[in-house]
Amino acid sequence: MQYPGELHEAFAALDRLPRVRLAGTVTPLETMRNLSARAGGAALVVKRDDLTPLAMGGNKVRQLEFILGDAMAKRADTVLITGAVQSNYVRLAAAASRRLGLSCHVQLEARVDRDDPAYRESGNVLLDRLLGATIHRYHDGEDEAGADRRLDEIAAGLADEGRRPYVIHLGQGHPSLGALGYVDAARELVGQVESVGLDVSRVVTASGSGATHAGLLFGLRLLGVPTPVAGACVRRDAERQRARIAAHCDSLSQLLGVDNPVKDGDIVTDDRFFAPGYGLAGEAAREAIRLAAHAEGLIVDPVYTAKSLALAIDAARATSAGGAVLFLHTGGVPAIFAYPDDVLAAVGNDGQAGHR
């Protein structure tokens, strides 16, 4: 694809950065006709980044291409990452490390006030163990800086043993390498939308670490696409999340050597479906779980994609004319096995046979 001027320089810079190929394919763009009919209003379309081909998929695959590209360029032999107990990022970092022949240490943070066996050992944690990751636990799920410091301490111990550790920090203040994956994904998405002549009025994604939200927004603005990108808050309130997205965009402009194309008014964060908090599903999220499954055979998880789909459905209902609402499915499907109560609450008595 040919780009003019500064746009060419930005994508040329992106393509020069160290990268390992993990996603490997363009993810599908699908119209959700049944769900659109039930929601009313605008059509709902889904970009299926839950189908990225690595260890049950998800958006972090695109992010890890640039993060682990940097790790490989620095000749690392061990990757360290921190995240919630049921972190999709942790699971995919462990899987990508295995594919690249690297060891992986994962730190699981107590962000959710739960310690039942399903949450502690099923879902993503089961896959972490299957993938052979060394598991550490961190007691405080709201101490992002402390979790990163503890990861650095583990890395220092590994270095003392002669290993070459590479730390994937979760907190701010580090280059937003992961967000580059969604700057690149913006190219893919624009190409898909143009090829089918789809008019998109709004893009909706989960907004947690913020790398996916910021990267996609930055990439679209870089390409001159003014479509709003709304981030459904899943970790913190809208005001704090907005500042996080802005910081990622500033970092991206430095990494790519271009002026930041994202203006203050471009950053849309919405926390109406965040309650009752991180890793906890409210009524709208549970309804989104049920609607997606019953209308489309689509699985969304209580932590991220149920909340972002709830926002997408709300946006579709509020749009009586104009383009489609595009929902970015960021994955997270393994986590549903750690949340059986939320899933069962979502479906109620549906499918239950009567007793005689």
Image (tube, rainbow, N blue to C red):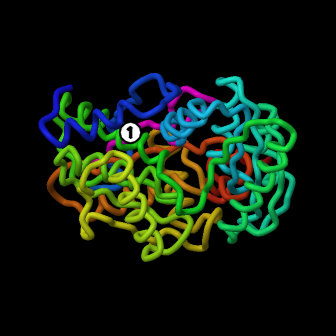
Question: Tag 1's secondary structure?
Answer: strand
In the image, what residue occupies the spot 85% across and 59% down? 116
* Residue 178, x across and y down, in percent: 49, 45
Vertical relation: 320 (above or below) 196? below
Q: Amino acid at mark 1?
A: Lys
* Residue 338, x across and y down, in percent: 74, 50
* Local crowd size for mark 1, using a 10 Å CA cut-off: few (<14), some (14–19), many (≥20): many
Q: Quadrant of residue 282?
A: bottom right
Tag 1 residue: 47
Label tally: 1
Question: Is 161 left, or right, of 242 in this rendering?
Answer: right
* Residue 152, x across and y down, in percent: 73, 55
In the image, what residue occupies the spot 20% across and 30% down? 196
In the image, what residue occupies the spot 85% across and 44% down? 160
Residue 297 seen in render: no
Residue 267 seen in render: yes
Q: Quadrant of residue 198?
A: top left
Question: Is 145 left, or right, of 119 in this rendering?
Answer: left
Vertical relation: 22 (above or below) 321? above
Q: Nearer the viewer, residue 289 or 102?
A: 102
Q: Nearer the viewer, residue 22 or 74?
A: 74
Magenta segment: 41-59
Residue 15 sits inside the magenta stretch: no
